[in-house]
């Protein structure tokens, strides 16, 4: 996800596209997708309430057209992500569990199944239940690797599972998973958001080991990727 001025430019472009879609195709899946994309930009800016509003609008359009659909489930997952960012873990879990149930019904082979499964694991981690978190995030990774090996979805699942290992004190295991996530994401695209996430996670793992200088190196790499300068050497 871009940062700073790039976020502002992304937001401006998306809002112009949304205005056109509202005129040309109101209430369409494309409008719902545009609303969701805008929501994710606001979430990246930590404007959680605004992000939630866009996600809920997106969900409303999907559910008006089709009560249960892949698009509705993905929008519901985004609503859950906003609630999780606000620390509303019960609401987040409810959204994720419903999204997963709907995906299993209407799009059981969707790559989104992996992401939502791992998101449930992250809520369990935030609740302090490392065992359940590990179970769900491992399941999410298994699904991603089976359906989309070498994809950004697999990199995301590796990152999420690594965070569970880190939260449980298994720093070495976490570093191994973050390293895999970095390799997979970098092969997809050098500026894939999962590259930044993996670099930041590697930095966090090194901080946990007290290796501050190494952590700073990876954090700096992450910032350089975000602004489009590539990895520092």
Image (cartoon, helix red, strand yellow):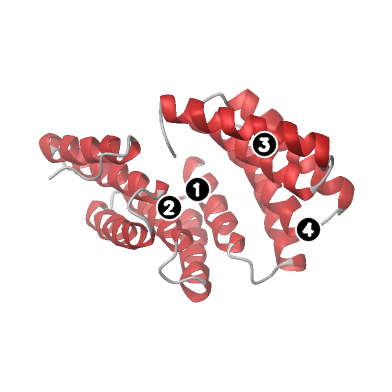
- Figure check: 112 above or below 31: below
Q: Secondary structure at mark 3?
A: helix
Q: Nearer the viewer, residue 98 or 154?
A: 154
Instruction: Assess whether mark 2 and mark 1 are in contact (beta carbons under 8 angstroms).
Output: yes
- Tell me the tag on residue 160: 2
Going from N to C along the chain, the mark reached first, 2 or 3, is 3
Instruction: Assess whether mark 4 and mark 1 are in contact (beta carbons under 8 angstroms).
Output: no
Going from N to C along the chain, the mark reached first, 2 or 4, is 4
Q: Nearer the viewer, residue 144 or 168?
A: 144
Q: Is residue 45 visible?
A: no
**Residue under the point 23% across and 40% down:** 221
Neighbour class for label 1 at 10 Å: few (<14), some, many (≥20)? many
Going from N to C along the chain, the mark reached first, 1 or 2, is 1
Number of the front mark, 3 or 1: 3
**Residue under the point 59% across and 40% down:** 81
Mark 1 to mark 2: distance in Å? 7 Å
Number of the front mark, 2 or 4: 4
Q: Quadrant of the C terminus?
A: top left
Quadrant in the picture for residue 47 = top right
Q: Which residue is mark 1?
A: 122
Q: Secondary structure at mark 4?
A: loop
Q: Position of residue 225 (x, y in %)?
A: 30, 41
Q: Position of residue 129 (x, y in %)?
A: 48, 49
- Tell me the tag on residue 69: 4
Q: Position of residue 185 (x, y in %)?
A: 36, 57
**Residue under the point 86% across and 53% down:** 67
Q: Which residue is mark 3?
A: 17
């Amino acid at each position: 996800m871009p940062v700073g001025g790039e976020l502002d430019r992304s937001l401006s472009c998306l809002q112009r596209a949304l205005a056109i879609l509202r005129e040309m195709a109101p209430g369409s899946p494309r409008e719902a997708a545009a609303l969701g994309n805008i929501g994710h930009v606001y979430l990246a800016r930590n404007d959680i309430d605004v992000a939630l509003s866009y996600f809920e609008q997106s969900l409303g359009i999907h559910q008006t057209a089709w009560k249960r659909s892949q698009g509705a489930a993905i929008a519901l997952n985004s609503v859950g992500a906003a609630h999780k960012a606000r620390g509303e873990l019960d609401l987040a879990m409810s959204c994720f569990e419903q999204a997963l149930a709907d995906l299993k019904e209407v799009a059981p082979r969707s790559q989104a199944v992996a992401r939502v499964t791992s998101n449930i694991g992250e809520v369990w981690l935030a609740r302090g239940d490392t065992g359940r978190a590990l179970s769900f995030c491992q399941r999410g990774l298994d699904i991603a690797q089976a359906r989309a090996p070498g994809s950004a979805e697999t990199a995301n699942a590796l990152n999420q599972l690594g965070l569970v290992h880190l939260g449980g004190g298994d720093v070495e295991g976490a570093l191994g998973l973050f390293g895999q996530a970095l390799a997979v994401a970098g092969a997809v695209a050098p500026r894939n958001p999962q590259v930044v996430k993996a670099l930041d996670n590697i930095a966090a793992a090194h901080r946990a080991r007290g290796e501050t200088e190494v952590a700073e190196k990876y954090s700096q790499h992450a910032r350089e990727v975000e602004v489009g300068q590539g990895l520092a050497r």
